[in-house]
Amino acid sequence: MNKDTPHLIPLTGNAGKAPVLLLDGNCSYNDLQDCADMRLSAAKDMLRSLSLLDSSEADGRDLQNFAHAAAVLLEDASDLLAAARQAVRRGLS
């Protein structure tokens, strides 16, 4: 967290040294939860599609790309859920 803007929380998935992607820790629990749910749903849908895919139709690189995208979405969702738990502790609903 930046000492000047402690409510801005860097996402775990930031590449490099400077945090480019930040979430607003001042948001309400519901807003943070909705954003986390959206990412969880997208990752779930991608993985469901991947599980139904005939492996003979997929290139190994395609499978890596799906797995990487799902991992990024799940990592973002995890960060959002952690911020949502903090919002509950602050009494924001």
Image (tube, grey):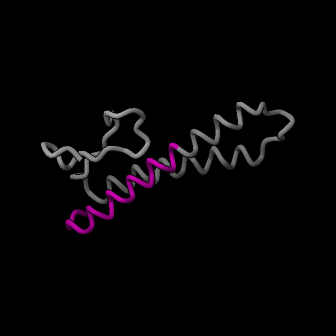
| Residue with the most extreme left position | 4
Q: Is residue 62 magenta?
A: no
- At x 33%, y 59%, the residue is 84
Give the main secondary structure of the magenta stretch.
Answer: helix
Residue 88 quadrant: bottom left
- At x 30%, y 60%, the residue is 29
Q: Nearer the viewer, residue 9 or 84?
A: 9
* Left or right for 86, reference 70: left
* Left or right for 56, reference 65: right
Tell me the quadrant of the picture where the C terminus can be found.
Answer: bottom left
Q: Residue 11 location in percent, x, y?
A: 37, 44
Q: Is residue 77 magenta?
A: yes
- At x 22%, y 63%, the residue is 92
Q: Nearer the viewer, residue 44 or 67?
A: 67
Q: Residue 46 location in percent, x, y?
A: 63, 44
Residue 78 quadrant: bottom left
| Residue with the most extreme front position | 17
Q: Residue 21 location in percent, x, y?
A: 34, 37
Q: Is residue 33 above or below residue 46?
A: below
Residue 13 quadrant: top left
Q: Nearer the viewer, residue 64 or 36?
A: 64
Where are the magenta residues, as a range? 72-93
- At x 57%, y 39%, the residue is 69
